[in-house]
Image (cartoon, grey):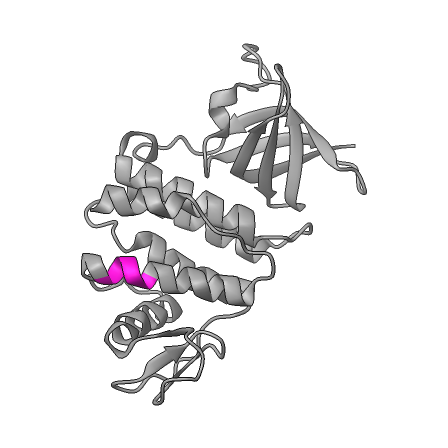
Amino acid sequence: MLEKTKGIVLHSLKYSETSIIVKIYTESFGIVSYLVRPSKNKKNGMKAGIFQPLAILDMIVMHKKQQGLQTIKEITQCNQFSQIPYDIKKSSIAVFIAEVLYKAIREEEQNESLFHFLKSKIELLDITDGRTGEFHISFLVELTLHLGFFPQLNYCENNIFNLYDGCFQENIPEHPYYISKELSGYFFNLVSASYDDRPVQGIPGTARKDLLDKILDYYRIHLNGFQSLKSHLVLEEVFN
C-alpha cells in the first residue's frame, strides 16, 4: 500500500554499483531503511544528491510491516536549503547532527513530537545568521528531552554535574564521569535555555570543545549502543 510521509535523511550507504541504502527518520513510521536506485529520471526525483544529511523530504513510499528494506516510489525536497550546503560550519553541523541521530534513535514507530522538533531545528539551522558555534551543543542537550534523560535543573553555584545520575551536586563523585565546576555553569546555561526555549549565551571555544566531549559521554552512558562519533572531530577543526 502506498503511503505519504515526510522524512529526514540521517545516513546513506552504497549497497551495490547501482543502489544505496538510505536511513530516514520518517514522520509516519519512525526510522526506516530504504533501498534506492538513483536515476536521472526527474519524474520520481530519485537522484543521489537529494539524500544529503538532514535533507527534509516529501515521499510516497511502499511501506510493509515486518519488512527490512522498504521502497520509495516518489520523492521531492520539502525544503530547499538556502545556507547549509554552502556554509562550511553549517554543513559540518548538519553532518554531525545526522550522525548523532543515526546512532541515537532506535524508534521504529511514529513519534510526531520528535519529528517536528527535528524538522524545526534543521530549518532554524539553515536560516540562522551570526553565531552557530553553540548550535550543535544546544541541540544535543535539547534532544535529551525527547530521548528521556534530560538533566535535572538543580544547579547551585560551584556544583559539578554527575553524568551518571543526571543531576548537579556539591561533591565530586567516586567515578570520573562528571563535568567540572568550571564547565558546569556553562552546562547549566545550556540546560536551562533548552528547557525555557531561549537563546544560548556565548560559550568560549575551549569550553565548547570540552563540553561537547562530556555531553557525548552523557549520551554513551544513557543510550545503550551509542557508539563513538567521527564527525565531531571535523567540527573541532572547522570551529578552531
Q: Residue reaching furthest bottom? A: 170
Residue 36 position, x and y percent, is 63, 24
Residue found at x 42% / y 73%:
177
Q: Residue reaching furthest top? A: 40
Task: Count all numbered tags in the image, as a single digit.
Answer: 0
Residue found at x 59% / y 37%:
23
Residue 161 position, x and y percent, is 37, 78
Tell me if residue 216 comes above or below residue 230 in the rendering.
below
Magenta-drawn segment = 207-211
112 or 164, nearer to the observer: 164
Asked if residue 208 is among those painted magenta in the image, a careful observer would answer: yes
From the viewer's perspective, tell me whether residue 240 is left or right of residue 67. Answer: left
222 or 78, nearer to the observer: 222
Q: Which secondary structure type mostly characterizes the magenta part of the structure?
A: helix
Residue found at x 30% / y 65%:
198
Say if residue 142 shows up in the picture: no
Residue found at x 58% / y 39%:
24
From the viewer's perspective, tell me whether residue 1 is left or right of residue 183. Answer: right
Residue 232 position, x and y percent, is 37, 48
Tell me if residue 236 comes above or below residue 199 in the rendering.
above
Quadrant (top left, top right, bottom left, bottom right) of the N terminus: top right
Residue 227 position, x and y percent, is 53, 52
